Image (cartoon, helix red, strand yellow):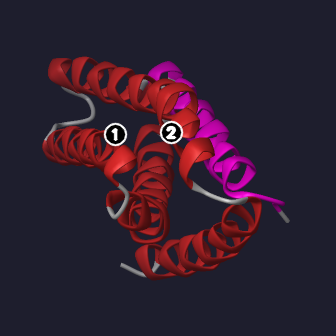
Amino acid sequence: MSENIYEALRESHETQRSLCRKLLRATPQSGRRSEIFRELRIELAAHAAAEERFLYAPILMDDMGLNSSRHALAEHHEIDECVEALNEADEKGESWSEKAKQLSHKVHHHLREEETKFFQTLGKILTDAQKTTLAKRYLKDFERMKRVLSEQ
């Protein structure tokens, strides 16, 4: 189990990066695109929900975290739009690969920015005890959301 919020988030970030790579490598003939996309969609949605509830919301309450939290929330919205566009695309069609690349780019950009800029801001706002407490809350909700989204 993760000791602090940084470790908890990085675990999901690595899963997201891996799934994005798999998604881009999957061919229409492999029959794995929809399976990988579903797994990525669930991972992204569960991560975003838990992160917004147990990290962004408390950080929004601090003046120092206001702008970075707003920016991160906006990027989550952009990722959601990319997921929706890919979900509506024909996985054997020409636009599918382009939409998958756009999604992967948005995800990688967000994760990189979060792990550098946002984590720096967190370090100035949160105590070690808060980082541990937030990790527990985040992980509990993340797992719950994965179950809920898997059943849909």
Image quarter hosting the C terminus? bottom left
Q: Nearer the viewer, residue 112 or 45?
A: 112
The x and y percentages for residue 23 are 48, 31
Quadrant where the image shows the N terminus: bottom right
Q: Secondary structure at mark 1?
A: helix
Q: Main secondary structure of the magenta part?
A: helix
In front of the other: 150 or 107: 107
Q: Nearer the viewer, residue 45 or 122?
A: 122
Query: In the rendered structure, which segment of residues is drawn in magenta?
Result: 2-25
Q: Is residue 100 left or right of residue 96?
A: right
Q: What's the amino acid at mark 2?
A: Thr
**Are the two marked residues, 1 and 2, in contact with CB atoms closer than 8 angstroms?**
yes
Q: Amino acid at mark 1?
A: Ser
Choose the circle earlier in sequence order: 1 or 2.
1
The x and y percentages for residue 124 are: 58, 43
Q: CA distance from mark 1 to mark 2?
A: 8 Å
Residue 61 part of the magenta-drawn span: no
Residue pointed to by mark 1:
68
| Residue lying at 36% horizontally and 20% vertically, measured from the top left | 105
Q: Residue 6 at x, y = what percent? A: 68, 48
Residue at image x 48%, y 37%? 118
Judging by the rendered image, the residue that carries numbered circle 2 is 121
Q: What is the secondary structure assignment of the residue under circle 2? A: helix
Residue displayed at 16% across by 38% down: 89
